[in-house]
Each structure stands twice: as C-alpha cells, then as structure tokens.
Amino acid sequence: MKRRNFARRPGCSVEATLDLIDGKWKGVILYHLQSGTQRFGELRRLMPAITQRMLTKQLRALEEDKLIIRKVYAEVPPRVEYCLSELGESLRPVIDILKAWGESHQQRLSCAPAPEAEPVKKPKRAA
C-alpha cells in the first residue's frame, strides 16, 4: 500500500498513525495478535464478519507496513502464522486505549448489543 508523505503538515503524526491502522479491520487484527501468534484460520474464526479476501488484504498491508510478521512453514499443507513485530508491539498501548474507550462508551456505539425488547402480544382472535 502506498503511503502518503506527512512531512511538515499540521497533525502529521496523528495522520501517519491513523494511516497505518485505518479501516475497519486493521485495529481488530492487531488487537487479536496481541494475545500471541495466530494462524489465518484462527484470525478468521475470531472475526467471522470479515471475508477471506479482506483478511488477506489487511494482513498484507500490515506486513508491508512492518506491523506484523508473516512466517511461512515449508510443510504440506503450508502453515502460515502471524504475530506482531516490534513496531506492532509498540502499538499495544494505543490498541488497549481504543478498547477501553469502546468499552466505556459501548452503549452509544452502533456495535453495542441491542437492548432486550419486550415480546409483542398478539391480539386474541374472535372464534
């Protein structure tokens, strides 16, 4: 992924950081990799809403940006594992703060669980 040049622009450090972890899935992938090395299938199970194509694309972008390390084992079938790089580990406090903020504001967020609705009573039919 081609990165923009943020030199000498107001807010450039914030823009540069957000450019690395932008989108719906990169932060989530980084969060799941904080718990340790994961295989592609494990990440897919942790994020059932992501498509295989999108997960592949996001993992490639994170690898290109040196935030994760992809390790391929010469086995049949091939085994591929992903883990945070040293640079990716340095984002741990950022991801933890995002998680904490989301938890404390969960009721207002669109991803919050829907409140339990009372069952609708059907009117009785006349015989």
Image (tube, helix red, strand yellow):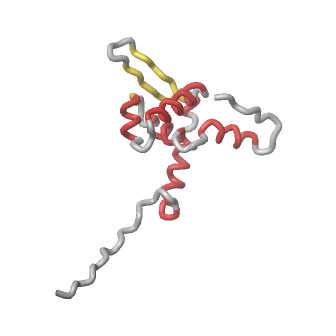
Q: Nearer the viewer, residue 40 or 93?
A: 40
Location of the N terminus by quadrant is top right
Q: Which residue corresponds to the image point at 38% horizontal and 11% vertical from the top-left?
A: 74
Q: Which residue corresponds to the image point at 41% horizontal and 60% vertical from the top-left?
A: 113
**Residue found at the very far bottom of the displayed protein:** 126
Instruction: From this view, report whether residue 11 is shown above or below residue 44.
Output: below
* x then y, percent, for residue 57: 53, 31
**Residue found at the very far top of the displayed protein:** 74
Q: Which residue corresponds to the image point at 41% horizontal and 22% vertical from the top-left?
A: 80
**Residue found at the very far front of the displayed protein:** 127
* x then y, percent, for residue 103: 48, 56
* x then y, percent, for residue 64: 59, 25
Left or right: residue 33 versus residue 19 is left
Q: Which residue corresponds to the image point at 72% horizontal and 40% vertical from the top-left?
A: 13
Q: Nearer the viewer, residue 45 or 8?
A: 45
Quarter of the image where one finds residue 127: bottom left
Quarter of the image where one finds residue 87: top right
Left or right: residue 73 versus residue 84 is left
Q: Nearer the viewer, residue 116 or 18?
A: 116
* x then y, percent, for residue 65: 61, 28
Instruction: From this view, report whether residue 79 is shown above or below residue 114.
Output: above
